[in-house]
Image (cartoon, grey):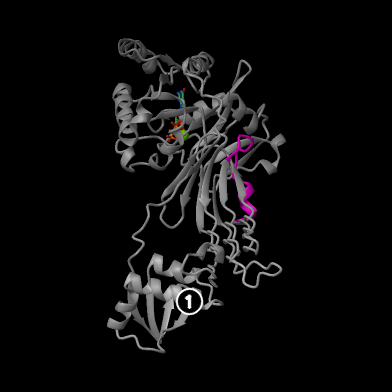
Amino acid sequence: MGTVRRAENLSCKASRRDVRQVLDTGISIMYPRSQEMNRLFFDEARIRVEAGAGGDGCVSFRREKHVPLGGPNGGNGGPGGDVYLEADRHLNTLINFKGRRHFKAGRAGHGQGQNKQGQKGKEITLRVPPGTLVRDTETAELLADLRTAGQKVLVAQGGRGGLGNAAFASPTNQAPRIAERGDQGESRWLVLEMKLIADVGIVGCPNAGKSTLLAAVSAARPKIADYPFTTLVPNLGMVSIEDRDFVMVDIPGLIEGAHAGAGLGHDFLRHIERTRVLVHLLDGASADPLQDLDGINEELKLFNPGLASKPQLVVLNKMDLPQTQELWPLIEEEMGSRGVPACSISAATGSGVRQMLYRVLQLLDSLPEEPEMVRQETAVFRPPKEEEEGFTITVEEGGVRVQGKRVERLVARTDWRYDESVRRLHRTLERLGVTKAMEEAGVQNGDTVYIGDTELEWS
Ligand SMILES: Nc1nc2c(ncn2[C@@H]2O[C@H](COP(=O)(O)OP(=O)(O)OP(=O)(O)O)[C@@H](O)[C@H]2O)c(=O)[nH]1
Ligand SMILES: [Mg+2]
C-alpha cells in the first residue's frame, strides 16, 4: 500500500534529535538522526540526456569466386541508443542526480558487408522516484508525469542508422556506390521535479494553528508564532498511530486570492494536489470561521477543482479558548447539515488530537485503495512534427545559410566519400526547390553555403 511504503522510506520512529533538511525549493523535511545524511532529500534536478548517434551505412559488394562484379551488400547502420526515464518504487528522492548531470546513450555500430546491420547503440534507463514530473528546460513543456512505478518514458531517441548501398539498388542502378551517414541522437536538458507525496494536507487561514497541529502529531518542528504567514514553506511530518504511518504536510496559510498568487500559498498548493485527504483547520479565535472555511474552499476550487473535491475533515482548533467552545455547537450543526465530517481540538494542549487522527485514518481507509502500481508501459512523448520541407535562405558573412529540417537532415546524412551520395543530394535539393531559390538569391558557383554543421562549396 502506498501509504505504508512511503512511511517506511521516509522516516520511522521519530526521535527528538531530528535533522532538518531544507530542500532546493525550500521545502523542509524532518529526518530522525538514524536516517543518516545519505537520505538527503532533493526534489529538483537538472540533467542533460543525449541519445546515441546512428551508425553509418556501408558500401560493399559481394565477392565470390568467378563472379567479377557481385551485387551490393552494404548493410545499414544500427540505430543509436535511446535514453529512458523509469519510475522506480524503491526510490523516493532525486539525490542520484545531484552529482551527475550528463547521461549519454551509446552510439551504434556502422553497417558492414554481407548485409550486416550495425549493432544497436546501448540504451540507458535512468531511475527516478514515482511522482516525478519531467519537463524540457527550454520549452518548460511537460514531457511526462511518472506517477506510478514501472512507468517509462522515452526522453531522447537514438539517431536513425544510415542506409547501406544494398538499400539503394534498383533496376536502373544495380551497383550503387552510395550510403548514408547515421543521424545524431536527440539531446536535451530536462528538469526533473518530484512532487512530494503527502497523504494528508492541512489547509486553513494564516494563524489557524496548522503548524502547531503538525508539531503536535509528528516530530516536525515548524516555526509557530502569533502572526500570519509564519510558515513560509511546506513542512512534512510523519504521523504514527496504531501501527500505521502517514505523511502530513502543513502549507503556508491561505487567503482570498491565493489561487491567483495572493499570500504565500500559491506556489505550495501544488504540494497538496496529490494528498488523499485534507484536514481543513478552522481558527477558533477567528471572527467567522465558517466564512473562512467557505473562502478557502473557494480558493482551492479556483486553483484546481480536484483539490476542492478531496475528502475533508473540518477541524475547529483552539478549543481551550472559551469563545471557541461557544462556537463549536454551531459549527458542528452546520457541518452535520452539509454532511461533512467535523471535530474539534486544541492543538496547543493536545486535547481531541488523537481522536482527530483516528478520524483521518478512517477517511484514508474509506478511500479506494490505490492500485499497486506496477504498470509496464512505455510512453513516448514527441513534439508535433514541424513543417519539415520548408527552408529559408539568409545571406551571412562569407556565404549563405540554408535552414530547414529536411534540408539539414539530408546534408547530415550525406556521406561525402561517395560521389553518388553527393549527386543524390544535388537531385534532392533540386526537387525541393532549394537550387532554384539559391539561383534566385544570386548564389554563384564557388560561393560558400552553410547547411547545418556542414560547409559546402556551391557548384
Ligand atoms: N489558544 C490556542 N492557541 C493556539 C492553538 N493552536 C495554535 N495556537 C496559536 O496560534 C498562533 C498561530 O499558530 P501557528 O501554528 O503558527 O499557525 P499557522 O496556521 O501555522 O499559521 P501560518 O503559518 O502563519 O499560516 C500561535 O500563536 C499558536 O501558539 C490552540 O489550540 N489554542
Ligand atoms: Mg504555520
Asked whether residue 94 is drawn in magenta, I would say yes
Q: Position of residue 354 (x, y in %)?
A: 54, 15
Location of residue 35 with respect to 284 vertically, above or below: below
Q: Could you say which is closer to the camera, residue 344 or residue 236? A: 236
Instruction: Say which element carries label 1.
Output: helix
- Residue 214, image x, y percentages: 52, 28
Residue 352 or 121: which is nearer the viewer? Answer: 121
Q: Is mark 1 within 8 Å of ligand 1?
A: no
**Pointer 1: what residue?**
422
* Residue 164 visible in the picture: no
Q: Is residue 176 magenta?
A: no
253 shown above or below 372: below
Q: Residue 63, how many percent across, how many down?
A: 67, 68
**Residue type at numbered disc 1:** Val
Q: Quadrant of the C terminus?
A: bottom left
Q: Quadrant of ligand 1?
A: top left
Which stretch appears magenta? Answer: 87-101
| Disc 1 residue crowd, few under 14, some 14–19, many 20+, Cα 10 Å | some
Give me the residue at 62% from left, 72% from top. 69
Residue 110 horizontal/vertical position (percent): 62, 63
> 94 or 238, which lies in front?
94
- Residue at image location 61% in from the left, 34% down from the top: 89
With 292 as the anchor, is 49 left or right in this view?
Answer: right
Q: Is residue 333 visible?
A: yes
For the image, the number of numbered tags is 1
Quadrant in which the N terminus appears: top right
**In this view, which residue lies farthest toward the front?**
66
- Chief secondary structure of the magenta portion: loop
